[in-house]
Amino acid sequence: MKSNRDDRYYIGSISDVNRRLWQHKEGLVYSTRRMLPIGLVFFQEVDSLTEAREIERKLKRFKSRHIIEQIIESVGR
């Protein structure tokens, strides 16, 4: 997800993307409440929540806006 307010990214893993997106947009999630308005810019379906959490950890380790944007761009093609 990306904040329309300050262009920060939020990375997370979930089992129901629509429900979680709604929670974020309604300000029900503490970690993104200050980032509103916020929108989904990328998501990837995987076989298990375990796999999703591993991908999330790897992305968060990058701590680089540039790398995150490259990933979004490469998948969007």
Image: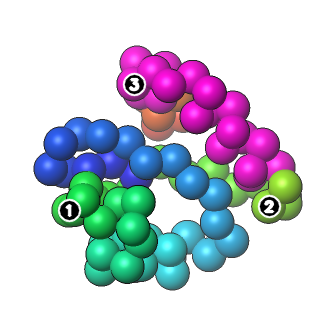
Q: Is residue 75 above or below residue 67?
A: below
Magenta-highlighted residues: 51-69
Q: Total of numbered circles in the picture?
A: 3
- Secondary structure category for the residue under label 2: helix
Give the mark nearest the N terminus, 2 or 1.
1
Report which residue position mark 3 lands on. Answer: 65
Determine whether, in the image, residue 45 is placed left or right of residue 60: right
**One can see residue 77 in this view:** no
Determine whether, in the image, residue 5 is placed left or right of residue 53: left
Q: Residue at x 79, y 61 (%)?
A: 49
Report which residue position mark 1 lands on. Answer: 37
Look at the numbered discs 2 and 1 and tell me whether their residues touch, using CB distance below 8 Å: no
- Secondary structure category for the residue under label 1: loop
Report which residue position mark 2 lands on. Answer: 49
Give the mark nearest the N terminus, 3 or 1.
1
Magenta span main SS: helix
Q: Quadrant location of residue 62?
A: top right
Q: CA distance from mark 3 to mark 1?
A: 19 Å
**Coordinates of residue 70 in the picture (x, y in percent):** 46, 22
**Coordinates of residue 65 in the picture (x, y in percent):** 39, 25
**Coordinates of residue 12 in the picture (x, y in percent):** 57, 54
Q: Residue at x 19, y 50 (%)?
A: 4
Tag 3: Cα neighbours inside 10 Å, few (<14), some, or many (≥20)? Answer: few
